[in-house]
Image (spheres, grey):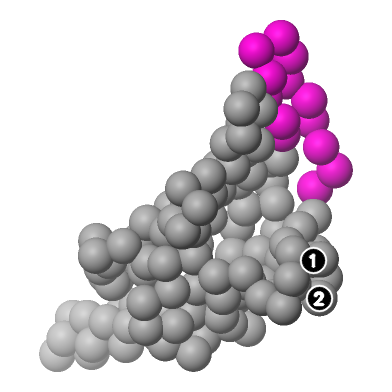
Amino acid sequence: MKKNLLALLLSIISCQSIGAVGDSYNCTMRQFMDVTPDKIYQKPLQEFTFVMKEDKIVFTVDKGYFAGLGEYLEMEVSRFRESSATGEHFFVNADNLRDSGVFDNNHFNYTYVEGALTQQMIAICFRY
């Protein structure tokens, strides 16, 4: 009986960690760098937020890393998307093909490429 109650409790707690449409996330960078053919430049760590939509994530552009990029910035969520006991997992990309990212286990890994410059960011994100 105790094992059944424990299993039920764990499944309820696990389900609460799965992201849902409309959820907002606050993210804090752990690594942020520009990579060129000659050098790696460490950049100041920042915060940013996004909202989970059905087929995209929409970044808040009034503050943080994505600030000043227009009215809003969104990245489409790929067809590969799954929710599990460990959280939400998906790939994202912008329509300009320069931005791509992976959201997995509350970690957001983002890459931007322009010419010889690659910008790489790793952030940890939590729902709020």
- Say which element carries label 2: loop
Q: Secondary structure at mark 1?
A: loop
**Going 56% across and 75% down the picture, which residue do you hit?**
58
Magenta-colored span: 33-45
**Residue 66 lies within the magenta run:** no
Q: Position of residue 25 (x, y in %)?
A: 60, 75
Residue displayed at 48% across by 79% down: 52
Question: According to the image, label 2 marks what residue?
Answer: 62
Amino acid type, residue under disc 1 in the picture:
Ala
Q: Is residue 8 visible?
A: yes
Whole-percent x, y for residue 22 in the image: 49, 90
The residue located at (68%, 40%) in the rendering is 31
Q: Position of residue 72 (x, y in %)?
A: 67, 75
For the residue pair 16 and 107, the one nearer the viewer reads as 107
From the image, tell me which residue sits under label 1: 67
Quadrant for the C terminus, please: bottom right
- CB atoms of marks 2 and 1 within 8 Å: yes
Using the rendered view, name the quadrant where residue 3 is placed.
bottom left
Of labels 2 and 1, earlier in sequence is: 2
Label 1 crowd bin: few (<14), some (14–19), many (20+), radius 10 Å: some
Amino acid type at image mark 2: Asp
Question: In the image, what residue occupies the spot 80% across and 48% down?
Answer: 45
Neighbour tally class for label 2: few under 14, some 14-19, many 20 plus, Cα within 10 Å: some
Q: Is residue 27 left or right of residue 56?
A: right
Q: Is residue 94 above or below residue 21?
A: above
The quarter in which the N terminus is drawn is bottom left
